[in-house]
Amino acid sequence: MPSILSSEATFRDQVDRLPFMHPVIFLSLFLGILLVFAFQYGNPIPILVIGALPFLFYAVVKNSMLVFLIWIGSSPILSNFVSINLGAGIPDLTINRIAASILFLVLVVQMALGQRRLQKLDAAEWTMMVVVLLMLPGISASFFPIHSAQQIFDSIFTPFIAYGLAKNLITSSREIRPMIWTLGIVTLYSATFGFYEHFTEHSLFTKSGVLYWAEEGIADRIQGPFPSPSALGTVMVGGVVFFFYHFLNSRSLWFRLFSLSVLVIHTFTIFWSYRRSVWMGFVATLITLAVVEKRVRKIMFWAILLLLLFFTMNWENIVGSEVFTKRFANVRTVNDRWNIWLTTFEIAKAFPLFGCGYGNFGHYYDKYFTFMGDTVTTKFAHGIKSTHNSYLRFLSEGGPLVTIAYLSLLVIITRRIWRLLTGRARHKFASRVEIMVFVGVFVTQYTQALTTDMVFFTKYPAILVFMLAGVLSHMEPGDRGAGRVRNLLVRMKIR
């Protein structure tokens, strides 16, 4: 019989022989922790979460891939309920922090025991490490370093962890299909919650039931299970691409009709976000699809004609609507953002190396406030705490070095996808659907970043972006170059 640490024993055998891994022990531990916390706290969520941690460890060891997909599929909902305050100075426990940390820890242990092979580190991962190191001075310079560290871990570091997890866990077509359908299910239930919010003006995920963004003038600005309409919009665009390809490719008439109905639902959900940045990302994604997919161009052409006809017939009603006057024709926010960006450059010049510190932008805004002409029209141009541009936030709070590093990471990922789309490289097991879903989410996320701080605040879309990027890192040389060589040899009559 092989020993626990022998090379002949599988990792599952090793786990099964460890007495503290037995489910009965876990059940006893769970009940004991539950009783202890029941006497000290009244909130059942912390009790259940902490008591369930041993079970989560056990589940990850048994089937890391399944737990990874459960995390991705349930995070939008559970993030609204699972958050445990451990006291001042101690990071809170959230579903994303718990899942990402445990999955990463178990993955490292499996590799240390030789039961899982570490995929070779690529240029994107090395650049992520550089980004992490360069963000540390900005975190330490923050007036609230614990809060800033938690925010940066959630929005920047956790997506990086998701990249590594996806790259090492999803390594075949057998595993990628459950992942992409998990994302499809997330978009379906997110759209359902969005429709509910639009028609009831009530949220199931806020304490008071009031939509966070209702006070901005359009009462039914929906957000679904996410903290903002921007996050909902990014996820919906990914769903549009996913079901659009199934509408084109499915052999089943019923499933094509289902996909078409989902496309309509998702498009309305994107519109009801009433977020111009979301609309920009959606349009940018459609343009990208039309550029890289010939069969999409005809559909786009007829869709544009129908939209022009609709606008022409209803122009008077459209220009008088609340959506047009408060979203499209509202130039005040454009002017105010221009002043914010000018002030951001002033702050960046005052802190030229590592920035003013994460979360400190609002503290220095009034001191370095600047404007051009008489464009400041409202009080919203003063006392601003957000740069309204993720790239400029990197520059002002983290400095030029981390800004260059993060942009370099995006260039590396963009170049990789461009090679896949142009045939210069091919993926070992992903289809065109997975590649284009990534393109939709990526384009929407980073188009919105031009006018929002969503890279720092919307956690789930960033996790999706880097998870898909990790999956798509499994590339090999394409046939395009070989085809050119063959054609050249034929023309030269060389056999």
Image (tube, rainbow, N blue to C red):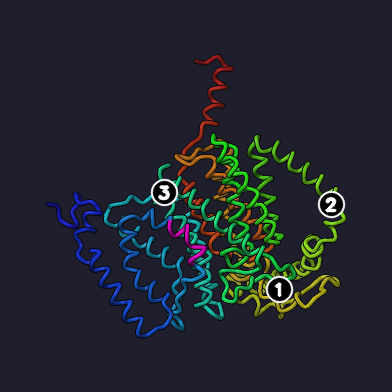
Point out the residue furthest to the left here: 1
* Residues shaded magenta: 70-78
Q: Quick check: is 73 in the magenta stretch?
A: yes
Label 1 neighbour load within 10 Å: few <14, some 14-19, many 20+? few
Q: Amino acid at mark 1?
A: Glu
Residue at point 66%, 56% (across, down):
270
Q: Percent x, y for residue 140?
A: 51, 76
Q: Nearer the viewer, residue 124 or 190?
A: 190
Q: Percent x, y for residue 391?
A: 64, 62
Residue at point 65%, 66% (across, down):
200
Name the residue beneath numbered marker 1.
Answer: 215
Depth-wise, is mark 3 or mark 1 nearer the camera?
Answer: 1
Name the residue beneath numbered marker 3.
Answer: 170
Secondary structure beneath dot 2 equals loop
Between the C-alphas of marks 2 and 1, the distance is 28 Å
Between the C-alphas of marks 3 and 1, the distance is 43 Å
Q: Quick check: is 307 in the magenta stretch?
A: no
Point out the residue furthest to the right here: 316
Between the C-alphas of marks 2 and 3, the distance is 49 Å
Give whichever of discs 2 and 1 has the lower sequence position: 1
Name the residue beneath numbered marker 2.
Answer: 314
Q: Nearer the viewer, residue 441 or 410?
A: 441
Secondary structure beneath dot 1 equals helix
| Residue 348 visible in the displayed image | no
Q: Amino acid at mark 3?
A: Ile
Q: Nearer the viewer, residue 116 or 181?
A: 181
Q: Amino acid at mark 2?
A: Asn
Q: Percent x, y for residue 156?
A: 52, 64
Q: From the viewer's perspective, is 141 left or right of 276? A: left
Secondary structure beneath dot 3 equals loop
